[in-house]
Image (spheres, helix red, strand yellow):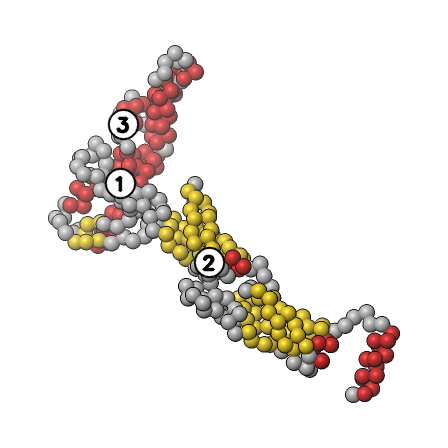
């Protein structure tokens, strides 16, 4: 990015007061406003530079960063963090990591003056030399999928910072699990590599099952007559319907285990947890007179 001297743009000295900066801006803004210069194609560009200079110099904090870091003032916090880290590692440490977060590390080399030379080489008009490259900032995002979707390997498309990203989610992914996509983060500085993108998976349960690890749990209603006399009952699993045999005199809240009918094990092809079915016996309602009579006979019989 080309270095622009904002003080020169506004025609003020570097020690100008806030009032002097404000006065200079107003004067130049009136002079170069595009509406007042319809025949001057350069007026719009100049007016934009004047506004940019004013936005920086009229803000005390931004002005302080600009005075110290020149055209790279927007990265002041990252550079300050790099300085603090370097100071903590000693005067002979040279920064090689990422001032934008994550992965900082240092190697020890050079003279004690290397550090100031290192940073001064970054800023236009402040010593020149080769510009140092910085890795981009890591980005963290959240992607929500349903439990049904997480049961199978599938593709998901989502948008981060205006960028459409398509990834494949393996079956059995966990709620809260984090996936790293290298070089999908923020752009590097001075041609440095991009940061990484970290995606945290959130799973919304859209089923009647409760997931615990790779096992699934579910309550299934069973009518009284089938529980007493036995028979067959069709139940739903995430992998499809299965038919179970009901033993005579099955009691309420008895749990049966269906081996291998639970949730897939993450990145283990063909491996599944178990499904636990708990029978919830339903008592009949709205009995007819005949049914009541039969229940009465059964009661007397027992």
Image marks 1 and 2: residues in contact by CB distance under 8 Å: no
Q: How far apart are the two marked residues, 3 and 1, measured between alpha carbons? A: 23 Å
Image marks 3 and 1: residues in contact by CB distance under 8 Å: no
Q: Nearer the viewer, mark 1 or mark 2?
A: 2
Q: How far apart are the two marked residues, 3 and 2, measured between alpha carbons? A: 55 Å
Report whether 252 appears left or right of 14.
Answer: right
Report whether 53 appears left or right of 247.
Answer: left
Inspect this view and state whether residue 283 appears. Answer: yes
Inspect this view and state whether residue 81 appears. Answer: no
**What secondary structure is found at the residue carrying circle 1?**
loop
Q: Which disc number belongs to residue 191?
A: 1
Q: Quadrant of the C terminus?
A: bottom right
Q: Nearer the viewer, residue 239 or 130?
A: 239
Residue at left offset 55%, top offset 74%: 258
From the image, tell me which residue sits under label 2. Answer: 153
From the image, tell me which residue sits under label 3. Answer: 5
Q: Nearer the viewer, mark 3 or mark 2?
A: 2
Residue at left offset 27%, top offset 24%: 8
Q: Which disc number belongs to residue 262?
A: none
Specify few, some or many for label 3: CA neighbours under 10 Å numbering under 14, 14-19, or 20 or more. Answer: some
Image marks 3 and 2: residues in contact by CB distance under 8 Å: no
Which of the 4 image quadrants contains residue 246?
Answer: bottom right
Position in image of residue 82 (x %, y %): 26, 48
Residue at left offset 57%, top offset 64%: 240
Specify few, some or many for label 1: CA neighbours under 10 Å numbering under 14, 14-19, or 20 or more. Answer: few
Position in image of residue 189 (x %, y %): 28, 41
First reached walking from the N terminus: tag 1 or tag 2: 2
Instruction: Work out whether 216 lies above or below 10.
Output: below
Q: Quadrant of the N terminus?
A: top left
């Amino acid at each position: 990015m080309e270095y622009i001297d904002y003080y020169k743009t506004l025609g003020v000295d570097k020690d100008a007061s806030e009032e002097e900066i404000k006065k200079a801006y107003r004067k130049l803004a009136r002079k170069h406003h595009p509406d007042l210069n319809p025949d001057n194609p350069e007026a719009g560009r100049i007016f934009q530079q004047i506004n940019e200079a004013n936005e920086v110099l009229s803000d005390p904090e931004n002005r302080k960063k600009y005075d110290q870091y020149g055209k790279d003032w927007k990265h002041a916090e990252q550079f300050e963090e790099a300085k603090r880290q370097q100071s903590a590692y000693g005067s002979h440490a040279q920064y090689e990591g990422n001032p934008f977060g994550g992965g900082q590390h240092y190697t020890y080399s050079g003279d004690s003056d290397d550090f100031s030379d290192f940073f001064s080489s970054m800023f236009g008009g402040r010593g020149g030399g080769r510009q140092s490259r910085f890795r981009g900032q890591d980005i963290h995002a959240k992607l929500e999928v349903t439990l049904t979707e997480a049961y199978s390997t599938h593709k998901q498309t989502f948008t981060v910072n205006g960028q459409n990203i398509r990834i494949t989610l393996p079956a059995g992914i966990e709620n809260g699990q984090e996936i790293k996509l290298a070089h999908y983060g923020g752009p590097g500085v001075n041609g440095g590599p991009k940061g990484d993108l970290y995606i945290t998976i959130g799973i919304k349960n859209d089923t009647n099952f409760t997931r615990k690890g790779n096992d699934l749990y579910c309550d299934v209603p069973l009518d009284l007559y089938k529980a007493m006399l036995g028979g067959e009952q069709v139940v739903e699993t995430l992998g499809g319907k299965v038919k179970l045999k009901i033993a005579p005199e099955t009691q309420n809240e008895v749990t049966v285990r269906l081996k291998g009918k639970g949730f897939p094990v993450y990145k283990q092809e063909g491996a599944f947890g178990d499904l636990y079915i708990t029978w919830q016996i339903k008592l009949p309602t709205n009995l007819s007179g005949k049914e009541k009579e039969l229940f009465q006979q059964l009661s007397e019989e027992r």
